[in-house]
Image (cartoon, rainbow, N blue to C red):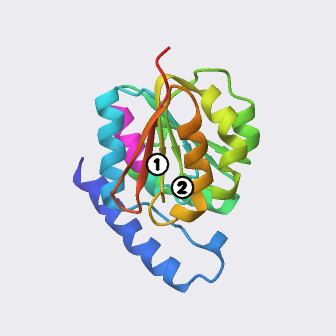
Amino acid sequence: MDDTLRSLLRDLEDFGATNDARANARHEKMLNITPETGEFLAILVLSAKARRVLEIGTSNGYSTLWLAEAVKAISGSVVTVEVSAAKAEMARSNLERSGLSRWVRQEVTEAGQFLGQQRPATFDVLFLDADREQYLAWWPWIQEALAPGGLLVMDNAVSHAAELHGFIAQVRATPGWRSLVVPIGNGEFVALKPVQ
């Protein structure tokens, strides 16, 4: 990772912490992943050679930068979905500043609608960090959108364990899927779609 990107990431970490401490409503917060989670995502993408990455929940693009830097190294791309036009614009600006925008396609839309329109086996990795109340409803589309052997990674598996219990139970009840919770950052739930 070059110094310019490291500096931008640090700036966004500071901005996110300051903004979220002051914001009252959830939709005003950036709710960015931790730097350790960003590194974890990059390592997963690179080790799996996951050239087709979908991110649900762009926010201001902090996590997108980690994913984009990883896919750049393997000639891949990221599609990132954000319902808030204001946050998507912040992300666009941050991606431009980073020089990584050409590896990212932004979609400003509701995630369920986007997922429901995807062709089967479109993505190798799906990073889920959005409206947690919707995850159970999205599960059929998530399964369909991921390629066999694809990875689902979900943020907040420890910090919001009670809220996500039902979704995690549903994934674990789905035949063939393997999963675990990794105690990094706010806790990452990682699930592997069956190869066959």
- The answer for how far apart the CA atoms under marks 1 and 2 are is 8 Å
Residue at the spot x=46%, y=71% of the render? 16
- Rendered image: mark on residue 91: 2
Q: Answer whether residue 131 is visible to the viewer in this image.
A: no
Residue occupying image coordinates x 29% and y 62%: 7
Indicate yes or no whether the magenta region holds residue 65.
yes
Mark closer to the chain start, 1 or 2: 1
> Residue 4, labelled with which disc?
none
- For the residue labelled by badge 2, is the local secondary structure a helix, a strand or a loop? helix
Return the x and y of residue 60 as percentages of the image width and height. Answer: 53, 60
- Is residue 91 shown left or right of residue 6? right
Q: Which residues, given as a range, are shown in magenta?
A: 64-72
Place of residue 144 in the rendered image (x, y in percent of width and height, measured from the top left): 64, 26
As helix, strand or loop, the secondary structure at mark 1 comes to helix
Residue 134, placed above or below residue 127: below
Name the mark nearer the viewer: 1 or 2.
Answer: 1
Tag 1 residue: 64
